[in-house]
Amino acid sequence: MRDPISHTKIDSTESMVNRPAGRGQPQANLMVPGSIPIQLVKPSEMPPGRTDDVSHASRHIGSSNVQGPSSHQNRKTLPKRKGRVEGNSIRNTIQSMSKPDRAWVPPTPSVSSRVFLIGWIFILMGYGIIGRGFANLGFAPVYIGEVVLSIGLIALVSSRSLGRLFAYPVSKILLAFLIWSLMMTLPHIPQYGVFALRDGVLWGYSVFGLIVASIIVSSPPVFRWILLRYRTFSIVFLALAWLMFVIMTSQVAKGFKLPGSSIDFFESKGGDLLVHLSGIAAFIAVGMSRNRLVFVPLLLFNLGILLISKRAGMLAFGAAFGLLLLLNPPKMKLSAIVFACTLSITAVLLINPKVDLGYGRVISVEQLTDNVVSTFDNSASSKLETTKSWRLDWWSDIIGYTFGGKYFLFGKGYGINLANDDGYQVLGDDALRSPHNAHMNILARSGVIGFGLWLAVHLTWFFTLLKYCLEARRRSMHNWHGIFSFLLAYWLAFMVNASFDVFLEGPMGGIWLWSVIGFGIGAVHLYKTQPEMGLDQIPVVIRRHVLSREGAKG
């Protein structure tokens, strides 16, 4: 005998529903494989206000794929769970019986999605560790990032999850931002040509966010796959980041270039590396990595070398870690972190190392002090104060000719060299095109409307994740709380560094930022639709921690 729905062979001695028990015998039980046993009782024995659930359940029994146990041993006692659990009422349980009795198999990503994911992880690794030199892999004007983007567009267009993706406000606002920015770019292509497209990557790379989110929505197992790939990235990064920075600053590999490239291959800026170090620190702090005793010393070692490189990177790391402390994920051991930082600072002050980097800065306590002081006040270093004043003057001019000038609505567009047009060019080959602030760059090129859409995208994304992060904390869903905390801290590091450096205008920062945003949209979707899936979508170390702690409490 075969089940008409699942087409699986069942024992002919078992019926779909147990026969009614005779007088004085136990009541019948409804049983679905892998579900909670349901005991039928008379409406008169139900608690007040619950008789409607019995009548509602009885309407579903006739069409349900319900199978009674053949023996008393088939009953399983499920562990009790603390906190809010979806679907624990009789109404929801009976409704679930009407579904086919087969294991749900998540959809497999399409061929284009799988090819994109492999290429996407590869370029993120290269951008994050090697930097600008890796971004020039290819032939102008088509580089490796544009090739992967093209594959991703095929996956996005062929995706069946666009309806679910654009059900979220942040996706709709992001689409509006894309359309507006495209309108601010197309009219300038005849005049500026490839420069318009080059400046347009500031908004164009946001398509990566939609691609990543759509793949996660359509194929949920990709969520865990990405997290595990990021854990691999964190290991490789901690092993090589400091070395990449030393190679660049010492210029031992100067002149080593890719064929057809005019840029040295090893071009890893300290500020960019500190952004990723912020994300990895958050990743470790929320408990999504094994062997903390190995990772924490490596992280502190990289931090000690990179912290003096850029004030922007230093602020990014501080802001990200400060937000993480406020969110306070349950896995994060604050006392251990404070002890490690105190021990490291004490050791640095006692040793006071000095390493000449070869471009006017040294690894020393004095340089770190100059970076901190110059951020908030006049520094003893005139060079640091000059760059600070130069930025502030340029930003002030941009605000003046947009909010209070003729470029209020549409800005200057994409393609024009802002440094030349605004009178702030400092490079002989006119290579500088950005005001060292992605937000001011958007304002100058897209006008107040585009700037408003830019802010709306990021603020909507931030407060959406913050909402579900706090909700997950209230529901004691520690895994989701940790994931959302990690993403929020990582995003903040990107935004802070982009406020003081040319970062999102290239693939090294742009593709990374929008990938984090897309991953966050996918995380929100899974949290809302499959909240229990989180236990299976993060590294095993967190699951063991959560289950052991809940068991200890029980």
Image (tube, rainbow, N blue to C red):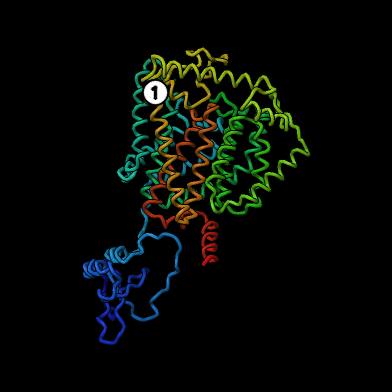
Residue 543 visible somewhere in the drawing = yes
User: On the picture, is 261 further left or further right than 146?
Assistant: right
Residue 123 visible somewhere in the drawing = no
x 46%, y 23%: residue: 441
x 45%, y 69%: residue: 79
* Nearest the eye: 480 or 98: 480
User: On the picture, is 540 further left or further right than 34?
Assistant: right
Q: Find the residue positioned furthest to the right.
A: 350
Residue 39, above or below 364: below
Residue 289, above or below 54: above
User: On the picture, is 241 further left or further right than 116?
Assistant: right
Residue 280's spot in the image, x, y percent? Answer: 57, 44
Q: Find the residue positioned furthest to the front.
A: 48
User: On the picture, is 247 further left or further right than 16?
Assistant: right
Element type at mark 1: helix
Which corner quadrant of the image does residue 131 belong to?
top right
Q: Amino acid at mark 1?
A: Val
Residue 396's spot in the image, x, y percent? Answer: 50, 18
Residue 238, above or below 15: above
Residue 397's spot in the image, x, y percent? Answer: 49, 16
x 50%, y 29%: residue: 506
Callout 1: few (<14), some (14-19), or many (20+) C-alpha neighbours within 10 Å? Answer: many
Q: What residue is disc 1 on?
A: 448
Which corner quadrant of the image does residue 52 belong to?
bottom left
Q: Quadrant of the N terminus?
A: bottom left
x 68%, y 31%: residue: 368
Q: How many marks?
A: 1
